[in-house]
Image (cartoon, helix red, strand yellow):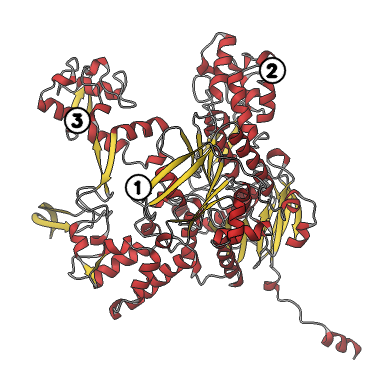
Amino acid sequence: MSTATTTDQQSPELHAADRHDLIRVHGARENNLKDISVELPKRRLTVFTGVSGSGKSSLVFSTIAAESQRMINETYSAFVQGFMPTLARPDVDVLDGLTTAIIVDQERMGANPRSTVGTATDANAMLRILFSRVGKPYIGSPQAFSFNVASVSGAGAITVEKAGRTVKERRAFSVTGGMCPRCEGMGKVSDFDLTALYDDGKSLNEGALTIPGYSMDGWYGRIFRGCGFFDPDKPIAKFTKKQLNDLLYKEPTKVKVEGVNVTYEGLIPKIQKSFLSKDREAMQPHIRAFVDRAITFQTCPDCEGTRLSEEARSSKIDGVSIADVCAMQISDLAEWVRGLDAPSAAPLLKSLGETLDSFVEIGLGYLSLDRPAGTLSGGEAQRTKLIRHLGSSLTDVTYVFDEPTIGLHPHDIARMNDLLLQLRDKGNTVLVVEHKPEAIAIADHVVDLGPRAGTEGGEVVFEGTVDELRSSGTLTGKHLDDRASVKPSVRKSSGALEVRGAGTHNLRDVGVDIPLGVLVVVTGVAGSGKSSLIGGSVAKRDGVVSIDQGAIKGSRRSNPATYTGLLDPIRKAFAKVNGVKPGLFSANSEGACPNCNGAGVVYSDLAMMAGVSTPCEVCEGKRFQAEVLDYKFGGKDISEVLTMSVAQAEEFFGSGDAKLPAAHKILARLADVGLGYVKIGQPLTTLSGGERQRLKLATHMGEKGDVYVLDEPTTGLHLADVENLLGLLDRLVDSGKSVIVIEHHQAVMAHADWIIDLGPGAGHDGGRIVFKGTPADLVADRSTLTGKHLAEYVGA
């Protein structure tokens, strides 16, 4: 009897399926992680903090998210996996309780010049269907409204087998596309400055061509010399009209050169295919300089920059064409869609309206669908990717965010926080890598990594709630409540940089004097016109060094030494002391280990399985030939130098036998931006976003210029690193430079000598200067959104 009573009083046992409420990670060793273990609550919002390079991304992206994606890929057949990116299993002992991971990273949108905000989301696809169904007059299927589809037609005889007989039939076909035939859907046409392509006073054999890569010793030169269309010893100025036309414009033609069948093509079509098919930002610096010099881009006169053919623009709904719709600000477009009465397309209008409302809800209502995707900032690109997940009915998914507050004004951060909490409240696990205190504050659970960066990081130094973090004594805990105060006195300007009649994008004929010799901060909500003002009217002037927020790309072969140009003086010093060629000291050139081609590892491709990399047995991962390592400089060989940290190398090249001022100068700049712990030969692929940002900053600081323009330099920086950045900005100004910073971080605003605030809103609600003056005046004024948030921040 007593036993039965006891059983009745016990709570019902938890169902086995409800016990999996943790993501367990044990023994994670990816990149710099030191065999760490964490347990993360599901259906909660967990924020990962720590200094830049402490291992946050290694844990969240390279371990948890990577394994989730790998396991999902494994559910497909081997045939399908052959078309998917291959992912290796992360270096971890146990990963338990994983759910499907959706990654929303801060990678900028692709550099494809054909990609726009509309094509990157589903908005353009839905608009094309809408116009093909409802637009008047009817011109064709949805592809008739696509600027990526050209109109083509053809006719001819074809051979078909019928009833055992071979018969010939005449067939015709036509495809109606929306591409503008003049600019081929690019919206811009290029005009060539022929004087930048060749020196007409010289013959080809005398080196008349001034295009990068077109020397007469190379293969291109041999084709031009042996094609037979003109005399290579005759100065170009003396070419006949036909010869000049063949040199510049000839269509691809088969010719025989030196006994080899090759295709000859005129200079201009060849340049268009090789150089102009790439986005300008993705070009190598010397190619970009040539393109800027030789080619002028202007809006296509036929389509007026809309990219669409006249026929595509002729079909309208309520008097509005698809080109007009794509040029509208998205918040206005959402209103227009809501006002349409088209019962036949009701489901489509509902879905399109929800997508456009998501843009507005996420704070991107100021964009237009025809905005090129490559011009979006990291924060805008991240929020654009988030749009497809906002209305999703999926639950029990793990959403992984990489600094979602990048590029957001303090006013917009509250909106982003609401979105993260909405995703969590639908029953999803939300993992966020973040530095901003306002975003850390909403966490249910915090994991702090550190204690420092690089080899001094990779450990979990705290796990718990935000309140517990404050009293934890970790670097993040100590700095979480840091508040910079407004400077009691500001520097006096030494002159002014005049901007008059600025009208780029949404700017409304803005005129402003930007003080010189001081620290100027340009601020305002996302989309208010900050980058348009500085990028359009200041950054391209002579003597201005502009450092944008585009992430630096790098392969496994590139490292801080190659990226900053540090390796050049080191190689020359090794070569001079040892009496050999500098190329021997490059792992990408003559000195490379022949077995691994200077990679240090040997890669085995296993088709749809993840490739395996094993350390090279010949050079033991040192990347160089054995004889190269016999050459010393200051008692060290080249591989020993490349394994030094920036701080060690700065000391090594700063004095004694190895004193090398050219290298020491670059290393001092790297140490200045807080990268003293990074190894100079470490692959760029292993650096975090914040470390890459600072590496870029250090490189540009070496350029000659009196005015520095920095676009959101606090991106990816921990609260503690922001102090170092402010010190660096002060040193630049004190050395006589003028520094203009586009920034949302209140600590940088408070530290400024002069603030220019744009607004009051975004898109067509912005584009005006709403305040200019000292930070103290802005706090006292409080008439703008920035003023209110800065006053709140400094506790005024």
Kind of residue indicated by mark 3:
Leu
Front residue of 276 and 414: 414
Q: Is residue 630 above or below residue 448?
A: above
Q: Position of residue 113 (x, y in %)?
A: 35, 47
Which numbered mark, 3 or 2, is in the foreground of this view? 2
- Mark 3 → mark 1, Cα distance in angstroms: 25 Å
Q: Are marks 1 and 2 in contact (CB under 8 Å)?
A: no
Front residue of 84 and 275: 275
- Mark 1 → mark 2, Cα distance in angstroms: 49 Å
Q: What secondary structure is marked by label 1? A: loop
Res 259 visible? no
Q: What secondary structure is marked by label 2? A: loop
The N terminus sits in image quarter = bottom right
Front residue of 161 and 751: 751
Residue drawn at x 70%, y 15% is 656
Kind of residue indicated by mark 1:
Pro
Q: What secondary structure is marked by label 3? A: helix
Question: Mark 2 Cα within 10 Å, few/some/many (few <14, many 20+)?
Answer: few
Sequence-earlier tag: 3 or 1: 1
Question: Mark 3 Cα within 10 Å, few/some/many (few <14, many 20+)?
Answer: some
Kind of residue indicated by mark 2:
Ser
Q: Which residue is mark 3?
A: 248
In this image, 506 relative to 617: left or right?
Answer: left
Sequence-earlier tag: 3 or 2: 3
Q: Position of residue 757 (x, y in %)?
A: 51, 54
Res 732 visible? yes
Q: Which residue is mark 2?
A: 655
